[in-house]
Image: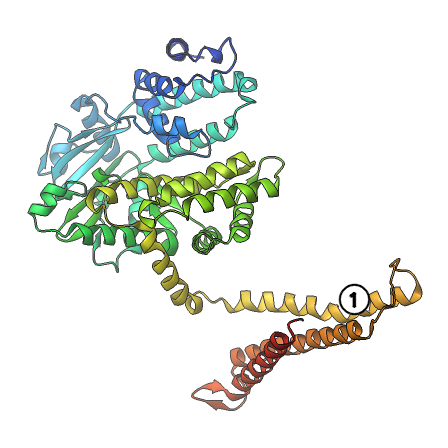
Amino acid sequence: MRRESVHRLRQIVKVFIYYGFGFLVDSKFSKDDNSPANLRKAFEELGPTFIKIGQILSTRTDLLPSNYIDELSKLQDNAPIEDFNNIEQLFINEFHDTIDNSFLYFNKNPIGSASIAQVHEAILKDGRFVIVKIQRPQIADEMHIDLSILSKILHLTKAKFTDTIIDLKDAIDELLKSTEDELNFRNEVLNLKKFKALNNDVNYIYVPYIIEDFCTKKVITMEKIDGIKIDDISSLSKAGYNLEDIGRKLSISFFKQVFQDGFFHADPHPGNVIIRQNQICYIDFGLMGSLSKSLKDSLNKAIVALAYRDINELVSILMSIGVRKGHIDKNSLYEDVEYLLSTYLSTSLMNIKVSLLFEEIFEITKRNNIQIPKELTILVRSLVITEGVLSTISPDLVLIDLIMPYIKSQNRNTFINDFEFDEFMLHSLKFMRASSLVPSKFIEFSDSIISGRAKIQLNHNNLDQPIKNLHRMVNRIVFAVIISSMIIGSSLILRTNIGPKLHDISIIGITGFIIAALMGFYLLISILKSGTL
C-alpha cells in the first residue's frame, strides 16, 4: 500500500472510531440510535468522496435500513472550488486546446461546485449559451483509493455484520459500479440522449441539447437552461403559471417514464427540474433508473392488485420479482401484506402517499427474506422526491388518484400494440400440448384404478351422478382443446393470408375465429348454468 493510502487509511479509521464506529476494528456491531446521524457526520468529515458514497447509498433501500437512508439523504454535495488552473489543464488534456480558444466567453467562477465536478457558464463562438461540467482532476484517483480502503475495512469486519440486513458484498459491488458510472460522463450523455428521444413527442417536456464537440469522459457541455425552479411557487405564480397544471403534467410525465418507457429520472429534485416557456425542463442525467419489460409488467400488475386489494396477486408478484435470501413463510408474508392493505386502504386517498406505501411493502419483503430488485428501490426514491415536489406546488393533487386512470388507459392502448404473435403462438402451443395430455392422463388414471395399481379407498354410494359429472367435465375439456386448435389454426391462416379474402383478410381465418368464439360462448354459458366444470 502506498504511503498516501496508508495515511488516508489512518485518517478514515480515526474518524470512524471518533463517531462511534469502533466496532470496525475492535468491538461488536453497534446498534446505537445515534449511529445513522454519526455515520452522516463521519462521511461529511471525510470529504467529497465519502459524501458521494453516502449519496449513492441513500438511493439504495435494499442495502441499508431506512433510518440510515433518511440520514444519508441529508448529505449536501458542496465542495471547495477547484483552482481554475487545474480545471483549464484538464480541459487542455481532453481537447488539446485552451478554453479561451474554444469559447467566446467562459466564466472562471463556477456556478456549482460538487464532489466530482464543477459547473461553469460559457458562450460558444456561435453565440449559444451553454454550461460546461468539468471533472475535478484528481477525483477519480481519490475515489478509487477511498473505495479500496473502505472495501478492505468492510471485508475485514464482515463477520461483525452477520446479524444485520446489510449484504456487504452487494454494497461494495454497487458502490464500485455506481462510482465508475458517475466518473464516466459519457454515461450521462447517453442517458440524456435516450431520455430526449423517449420524450420528443411530449410537448410540455424539454431536454437540453448536447454539444458533442465538447464532450468527453471528463467533460460535458450542454445547452444552458434559464428558467424557474419547480418549487419556487412565488416566482411561478408571478409569471402566470398554473401550479396545479404543472403538478399534473409532472405526474403524467413520471408515470410515462416508469410504466411506458421503463427509463426514468432518478433524481428529480427541484434543482434538476426547471420551468421555462410552459415546459418542464429536466437537467442532470447522472442518475437514471431503468426497468425491464417484465419488471414494468409486474409493477403494472402490482398497482392493479393494490387498487383491487388482491392480496394473493400482490404476494405472488412480490415473490416472483424478488430474490429469496432465506426461508419464506408464505402465511407470514400474506398476513403482513393483508395488514398493510387494511391499514392503508381504509384511510382517505388524500392521506395516502404512494412512495410511503411502497416503502412499507419493501420493508415487509425485507422482513420475509425477499430482496427487491435495486431498480425498484431507486424508483421509490424518485417517487419520494416527486411526491415532495408535488406537495409543494400542488398540495391538493393526489398522486394515487392519477395513477389508476393512467394504468387503465395504458392497458387499453397497449393490449394490441404490445401483442406479440410469436409469444402468443408459443404459449398457445404449450397449452395445446398440456391440454392434449389430459384425456390420456385420465385414461391412464382410470386404468390404474381398474388394474388395482392405484391405492384409493372408495365407497360406492350413489356414484351415478358424480360419474356423469366426470364425463361432462372430460367432454368440456376436449371441447376446449378443439376450440384452442381452431384458434391456433385460424391464427396461422391469418398470418399466412391464404384462401379467399375480404378487404385483404382471409375469410377462412376470420370464419374460424367466429366459430371458435361461438363455441367458446356456448361452453362458458353451459359451465355457468351448471355451476361446475
Residue 328 position by quadrant: top right
**Residue in the foreground of this view, choosing between 288 and 98:** 288
Q: Position of residue 509 (x, y in %)?
A: 54, 84
Residue 499 against residue 303 in the figure, above or below: below
Image side of residue 528 versus residue 311, left or right: right
Q: Which residue is mark 1?
A: 441
Q: Position of residue 137 (x, y in %)?
A: 27, 25
Image side of residue 355 versus residue 232, left or right: right
Farthest right residue in view: 451
Q: Residue at x 87, y 67 (%)?
A: 460
Image side of residue 363 versus residue 319, left or right: left
Image side of residue 441 versus residue 245, left or right: right
Farthest front residue in view: 461
Q: Residue at x 31, y 41 (%)?
A: 188
**Residue in the foreground of this view, choosing between 201 and 441:** 441
Numbered disc 1: secondary structure: helix
Q: Amino acid at mark 1?
A: Lys
**Residue in the foreground of this view, choosing between 227 and 173:** 227
Residue 296 against residue 273 in the figure, above or below: below
Q: Residue at x 53, y 21 (%)?
A: 161
Q: Position of residue 174 (x, y in %)?
A: 45, 32
Residue 474 position by quadrant: bottom right
Q: Quadrant where the N terminus lies? A: top left
Q: Quadrant where the C terminus lies? A: bottom right
Residue 285 seen:
no
Residue 88 seen:
yes
Q: Position of residue 405 (x, y in %)?
A: 34, 60
Residue 213 against residue 196 in the figure, above or below: above
Q: How is the structure coloured here?
A: rainbow
Q: Residue at x 34, y 50 (%)?
A: 349
Label 1 Cα neighbours within 10 Å, binned few <14 / some 14-19 / many ≥20: few
Number of marks in the image? 1
